[in-house]
Amino acid sequence: TTNRSLNFGAGPAKLPLEVLEEVQNELLSYVSSGMSIMEMSHRSKEYVKINRDAQAAIRELLNVPDNYKVLFIQGGGTGAFAAVALNLLNRTGTADYCVTGTWSSKAAKEAAKYGEVRLAFPVPKKLGQIPDQSTWTLNPKASYVYYCANETVDGVQFHFIPETNGVPLVTDMSSSIMTEQLDVSKFGCIFGGAQKNIGPAGVTVVIIREDLLGNAMKVCPSVFDFTNVNKESSIHNTPATFSVYVMERVFQWIKRNGGVAAMEQQAIAKSKLLYTTIENSNNFYSCPIDRIARSRMNIPFRVGGENGDEKLEKLFLEETEKLRMFQLQGHRSVGGMRASLYNAVTYEDVETLVNYMKEFQQKYG
Ligand code: PMP
């Protein structure tokens, strides 16, 4: 038995219990070395193997083609906003950004420090929408087209891969990597911070097409220079060794549990359960996101009508916390509630939440 809470946090977020127990077992002495992996050199044979195994697992889980490199960097998703521009924007000096929420907006601002940033479409007046691709204008000379596959704050997710007619596609999958099957060959570069679906904070996964390497700007810090990081197999300087180690264990857990295909099926089932509860609540609960752009990972909702009733929302948070359901508060910029249903969150966790939502509505609706 454990005293684990139900954790619907947006990140850092719930990790699989099995993985945490494995880490606990190995904490004081990693494979009879008499020391924790945290206390070991990043050049040790133990760590070098973890680094290699983690990269191999990503290749296997996402069917990464041979002409792509898998890298680990630090600096989080935000570091990758700069790294992408520093590595790729030099090719033509201009890039197209799809702004559909908080994180793509921040990425566009960061990239604008290093070159020209054009918007593929005007920022939707009301977030929660992805304009139909027929309305976009893409620059055929862009260095790349950028989009955020899943907007963690806003609850907006792309359920299609944009067509860019040969211009490399770059995507931020910080909150959706390993939650859906992916045709990596459609992308120039994919990146994602680990702290939502695949591990603790501290490491960012980058998957990049080989031919795009070698274009970094002169000012690019060496720790962000993908060509350099690749040459050193992601051990250019001291990596976030413990984070990479836990992430590697999460990958093995995903493999044991049916791989990314199974994660995708579960994500569909879990999110459907919550959206259906919202839809069937006679507007007591409401979700402002266009149906076709709704996220399977982060589900924002209001309590007490379309604009939310702040008193009821406060009460909802208090009552759910009494039942040990945590981190349900929406992002401070949007208010309301948000339930994040990452890979480690079980169907049963979501059932507990929706059952309580129904009870709460009966009591206060
Ligand atoms: N992109 C997305 C989609 C995110 O959800 C986040 C963090 N929540 C970031 C980027 C920024 O990540 P970090 O905090 O690791 O810089």
Image (cartoon, grey):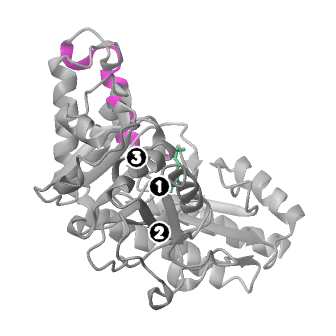
Q: Secondary structure at mark 1?
A: loop
Label annotation for residue 361: none
Q: Quick check: is 19 in the magenta stretch?
A: yes
- Name the residue type under label 3: Leu
- Name the residue type under label 1: Val
Query: Which residue position holds label 3?
Result: 86
Question: Where does the image place residue 32, in percent across and percent down from the top left?
Answer: 19, 13
Extreme residue toward the top, this view: 34
- Main secondary-structure element of the magenta-colored stretch: helix
Query: Which residue position holds label 1?
Result: 345
| Proximity of marks 1 and 2: CB atoms separated by less than 8 Å | yes
The mark nearer the N terminus, 2 or 3, is: 3
| Proximity of marks 1 and 3: CB atoms separated by less than 8 Å | no
The residues tagged by marks 1 and 2 sit, at their Cα atoms, a distance apart of 9 Å
Do we see residue 148 in this rendering? no
Q: Is residue 121 left or right of residue 322?
A: left
- Name the residue type under label 2: Lys
Q: Secondary structure at mark 3?
A: helix
Residue located 48% across and 55% down the image:
115
Q: Which residues are magenta?
A: 13-32
Q: Few, some or many C-alpha atoms within 10 Å of disc 3 (few <14, some 14-19, many ≥20)?
A: many
Q: Secondary structure at mark 2?
A: helix
Q: Few, some or many C-alpha atoms within 10 Å of disc 1 (few <14, some 14-19, many ≥20)?
A: many
Q: Looking at the image, is 56 positioned above or below residue 156?
A: above
Query: Which residue position holds label 2?
Result: 270
Extreme residue toward the left, this view: 66
Q: Few, some or many C-alpha atoms within 10 Å of disc 2 (few <14, some 14-19, many ≥20)?
A: many
